[in-house]
Amino acid sequence: MLILAFDTTSEAGGVGIFRGSRCLAEVVSDGPANRYSLSLFDMVDRVIDEAKTRHGVPGRGLADLGLIAVASGPGSFTGIRVGLAAAQGWAKAFGLPARGVSVLAALVEAAPIRTEWAAAILDARRGEFFVGLFQRVGAALVAAPGQPQELPVKEEDRFFVPAGEGWLLKPAELVPFLARHLPEETGATCVARGHDRAALALCGTLPSSFSRQVVQGTLVEPVARLGFREYRAGKPQAASDLDAYYIRRPDAELYWKE
């Protein structure tokens, strides 16, 4: 199955074509997040042309896709809206299934984590941070919650699932928040992006029971993997069901006056 995956939620975004979990081509963004309305379509054309040239992908472009996976936030409000609108338009025009993927989930998916818990942290600006908590579980537990698990879960079948909807926190709130939400004496991994200096600095203030992982480059590949995993689990989304994952409400809503 050919997958088009893209992330327009930050300046460190990009577009990729994947066959299953194998990346056939990727184009990295070289501009700010508020310019994706101009650059996204060119990036998609470039990545499709590269996949055709290097791997002999069929020549009908978007019509040959099997799935669209798009980063749904949190991040730049403008970038999120552009990405979701494009995914909705292409999914509807070509009759394709689609899947929105949380940037926080993609961040955890991209990192080599050994602990049972992970905290993804992104700079939300204005002295605040987006925080997502994730717990490692077995595929059997996800497929049949509440059912007894008779066979041991292989390590390759274990992955992280969200432990909540995501939070917007100030720096001083992070340690008390983690103390409330994590089991006592539980180690966890803090995950931040390499270009996110504020989040990296915040991770450095956490107790010694936390390890740290830094994710470099784009999140296009983990967006593709997570979208494909949800598709195989029978959880694709119709174009009309794609929705933004903001956590913080847009200014247009905060300051709206009737």
Image (cartoon, rainbow, N blue to C red):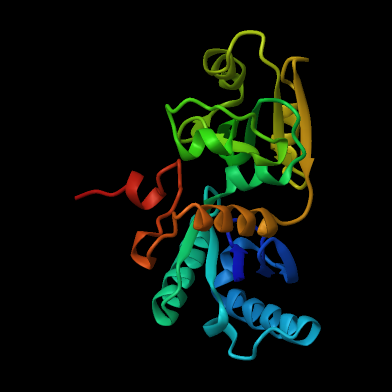
- Identify the residue at image location x=43%, y=54%: 244
Q: Nearer the viewer, residue 142 or 181?
A: 142
Residue 70: x and y in percent read: 54, 61
Residue 251: x and y in percent read: 40, 49
Q: State whether residue 72 appears in this view.
A: no
In this view, 233 is above or below 3: above
Q: State whether residue 192 appears in this view.
A: yes
Q: Nearer the viewer, residue 203 or 143?
A: 143
Residue 229: x and y in percent read: 57, 53
Q: In the figure, residue 61 lies in which quadrant?
A: bottom right
- Identify the residue at image location x=44%, y=32%: 145
Residue 32: x and y in percent read: 65, 63
- Identify the residue at image location x=71%, y=41%: 156
- Identify the residue at image location x=44%, y=28%: 147
In this view, 62 is above or below 80: below
In this view, 61 is above or below 181: below
Residue at the left extreme, as displayed: 258
